[in-house]
Image (cartoon, rainbow, N blue to C red):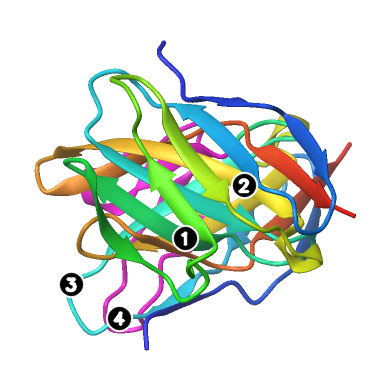
Amino acid sequence: EPEVTQTPSHQVTQMGQEVILRCVPISNHLYFYWYRQILGQKVEFLVSFYNNEISEKSEIFDDQFSVERPDGSNFTLKIRSTKLEDSAMYFCASSELLRGVYEQYFGPGTRLTVT
Amino acid sequence: AQRVTQPEKLLSVFKGAPVELKCNYSYSGSPELFWYVQYSRQRLQLLLRHISRESIKGFTADLNKGETSFHLKKPFAQEEDSAMYYCALSQEGGKLIFGQGTELSVKP
């Protein structure tokens, strides 16, 4: 069964550094998402992406964040200058639209630790 | 504002006991609701979607628009059901709003 994959599984970075989190969505899916989960808190929506552009973004997704689909398979989340509060699990998800419903399938997550 | 509430952080039951994980939502439109499960050190997995009215691994969930609830139920809990369970509401465009999650612990 096809799965969403994410790399790396764990990233440690220093405050102020740029990080790129990578995701390979399920191949026939057209809708892509990033979520994050700070330890002990709920899973929060960051951004959705369709047809090579952002469909929607949350207030968390400020100018420090960007997403890209650089080729036909990868979907990346970049944080330009990381802050301590960016430490979280970052989940990528992809979906197709079936009978009006987006069923999202999640990757295993990347644990980002900012020191 | 759209919101999903799971009032219990932890639910502990014995094997064979019935389970009900509560989920309430606040949404102005016609909601699309899901339950996701996360087993220890694994990814979030789609468990149920309200639109298909199915039973997966013995779990069912009924959308009650009057009570704005989508509680997850299973008549006889198994130890392998121990996991984090998240209720989620899908908005237009697919954005998911998650509840806080309920940790289900099934004791032998």
Q: Are marks 3 and 4 in contact (CB under 8 Å)?
A: no
Residue at the spot of label 3: B30
Quarter of the image where the N terminus of chain B is located: bottom left
- Find residue A90 and name its label: 2
Q: Secondary structure at mark 2?
A: strand
Chain letter for mark 1: A
Q: Secondary structure at mark 4?
A: loop
Residue at the spot of label 1: A46
Does A44 sit above or below residue A3? Answer: below
Q: How dense is the environment of label 4, judged by Cα within 10 Å: few (below 14), some, or many (20 and up)?
A: some
Residue at the spot of label 4: B27
Q: How dense is the environment of label 3, judged by Cα within 10 Å: few (below 14), some, or many (20 and up)?
A: few
Identify residue type, mark 2: Tyr
Q: How far is the residue under mark 1 from the one under mark 2?
A: 9 Å
Q: Are marks 1 and 2 in contact (CB under 8 Å)?
A: yes
Q: x%, y% of residue A70?
A: 35, 29
Asked whether residue A10 is in view, the answer is yes
* Left or right of B65, for residue B103: right
Q: Which residues are magenta?
A: B44-72
Q: How far is the residue under mark 4 from the one under mark 1?
A: 19 Å
Is residue B98 inside the magenta stretch?
no
- Find residue B107 and name its label: none
